[in-house]
Amino acid sequence: MVRYDRTIPPGGVGQVTLQVNTTGYQGKITKSAQVTTNDPRQRQSKIYLVINVRTYIIVEPGTKILLRGTVGEDIRRVVSIRATDDQPLEITKVQSNLRSVIDYKLNRKDDSHQYELEVVSKATERKTASGFITLHTNHPKKKVVKLSVHIRIRPELEAWPNKIDFQEGSQTGSKSKESKRVLTIMNTRGKNFKILELSYNKAYFQVRSLGQDDKAASRHKLEVVALMDQLPEAGSNSRTS
């Protein structure tokens, strides 16, 4: 958050305050703010705030756990947890609001007060979700450690965009005879594939490949043409394929 105390007159002095919420951060972080003035020689300048955030319990590589991959893959992440002081750390309980889509296992390392938390995705289909894993500890100054978890599991073949909207008419109210959109089909693992057949309603749409149909590639582009004069009338001026 940035704020300044007043408009600064020529030759005057004012204060610009940068305030940072360090929740969830650890280590060195840098934040900046851009200052805009009416000085014709230097209308814009940047000010920086560099902070070294110390925490009683450190989580490595960080408190944000990203589970990203493709359906069918083994998607897991491991974080280590330890105290930064001489306090003997005990993790007494682990909770999560994502138990339906993740599994997790807490292991103590070699009879020490260091832990490893392994988090595994259970998703068997396309899934996007965010939540938390909460660690309860015996540390007198850090009773709770919250880890954010972000899940994005994609199918092996994905279309973008996954919905095509066609708009008919114009500002003058005229009705166009056709409307074109481009659809990209991609393999999220980067593997090559071929499109062998296209099935669609030929009365309302025309679809053609923008590449070579018999050539394997990790992504293919299709041109989708809506025959606007052929589409059935509806209460809305929007048509979707």
Image: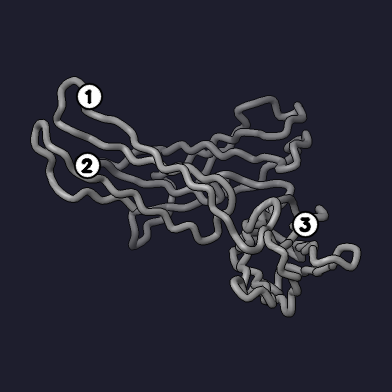
At a point 9% along the width and 37% down the height, the residue shown is: 9
- Residue reaching furthest front? 86
Residue 147 lies, with reference to residue 184, above or below; the image says below
The answer to whether 79 appears left or right of 235 in the picture is right
Mark 3, mark 2: which one is toward the viewer? 3
SS class of the residue under badge 3? strand
At a point 21% along the width and 27% down the height, the residue shown is: 43
- Residue reaching furthest left? 9
Amino acid type indicated by mark 3:
Val
Q: Mark 3 or 1 closer to N-term?
A: 1
Mark 2, residues whose alpha carbon is within 10 Å: few (<14), some, or many (≥20)? few
Q: Mark 1 or 2 closer to N-term?
A: 1
Image disc number at residue 171: 2
| Residue 76 image point, x, y percent | 78, 57
| Residue 200 image point, x, y percent | 61, 48
| Residue 63 image point, x, y percent | 63, 58
Amino acid type indicated by mark 2:
Gln
Mark 1 → mark 2, Cα distance in angstroms? 44 Å
Amino acid type indicated by mark 1:
Gln
